[in-house]
Amino acid sequence: MSQKRLWAPWRVGYISGILKPQSKGCPFCGIPKARSDSKRLILARGRLSFSVLNLFPYTNGHLLVAPYRHVGRFESLTGEEWLELFSLAKDAMRRLKKRMAPHGYNLGINLGRAAGAGIPGHLHLHIVPRWVGDTNFMPVIAESKVISQSLAAAHSLLRKTDGEKRGR
């Protein structure tokens, strides 16, 4: 069998250290402490939560919404945190719709390691834009997923504001 090669230009930034790990502990606690939203791929900030592109996306535009507070249990969110988390999710989906025109979305929160949470101590909502026909033979036959847009390009596209206020 021949060697598999995929074009993944965004990986060079990660490998060369441009996208350094956010912190030694919880990455979701470290991301919002960044001085540059562009370097950390933050799309929007609220008072209690933020949205950010996923460093390891399932598809173009895959993003996460998380509270600033380190909390792993859904029932431990305050009412204000819950409201802002979903308000930022709504804003993110509006941005995705306007800039990338997905046909649908997968939304998910994995709570606990047994449920697939990679970082069980800090809950976060996944928003995965989907397009008709976005699955093909690559994941099934080649066990590979092709991401056709760099993280920097997706961040720039989704941060466009059309006159709305921007974070840092």
Image (cartoon, rainbow, N blue to C red):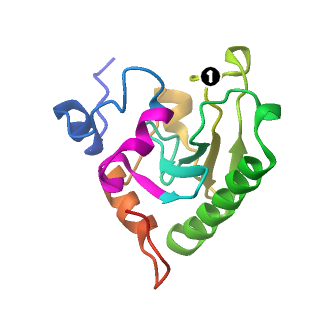
Q: Position of residue 79 (x, y in %)?
A: 81, 48
Q: Residue flagged by tag 1: what amino acid is it?
A: Gly
Closer-to-camera residue (93/59): 93
Q: Is residue 126 left or right of residue 62?
A: right
Which part of the image, by quadrant, shows the C terminus?
bottom left
Residue drawn at x 66%, y 64% is 103
The answer to whether residue 162 is above or below residue 17 is: below
Q: Where is residue 61 in the image (x, y as percent from the top left)?
A: 50, 54
Residue hosting label 1:
121
State the predominant SS element of the stretch in magenta: helix
Identity of the residue drawn at 49% across and 26% down: 143
- x then y, percent, for residue 55: 41, 39
Residue 45 lies, in percent from the top left, at 51, 57
Q: Measured along the vertical axis of the image, is residue 90 above or below residue 126?
A: below
Disc 1, SS: loop
Can residue 143 be found in the magenta stretch? no
Q: From this viewpoint, which residue is outermost toward the left?
A: 16
How would you rate the neighbour count of disc 1 (Cα within 10 Å): few for under 14, some for 14-19, many for 20 or more?
some
Say if the magenta span includes residue 30: yes
Specify whether residue 150 is in view. Answer: no
Q: Which of 163 and 8 is in front in this view?
A: 163
**Which quarter of the rendering shows the N terminus?**
top left
Name the residue at 71% across, 40% down.
108
From what the image shows, is residue 131 above or below residue 55?
below
User: Furthest residue to the bottom?
Assistant: 163
What residue is drawn where x is 46% and y is 58%? 43
Q: Which stretch did the figure color magenta?
A: 28-43
Q: Is residue 41 visible?
A: yes
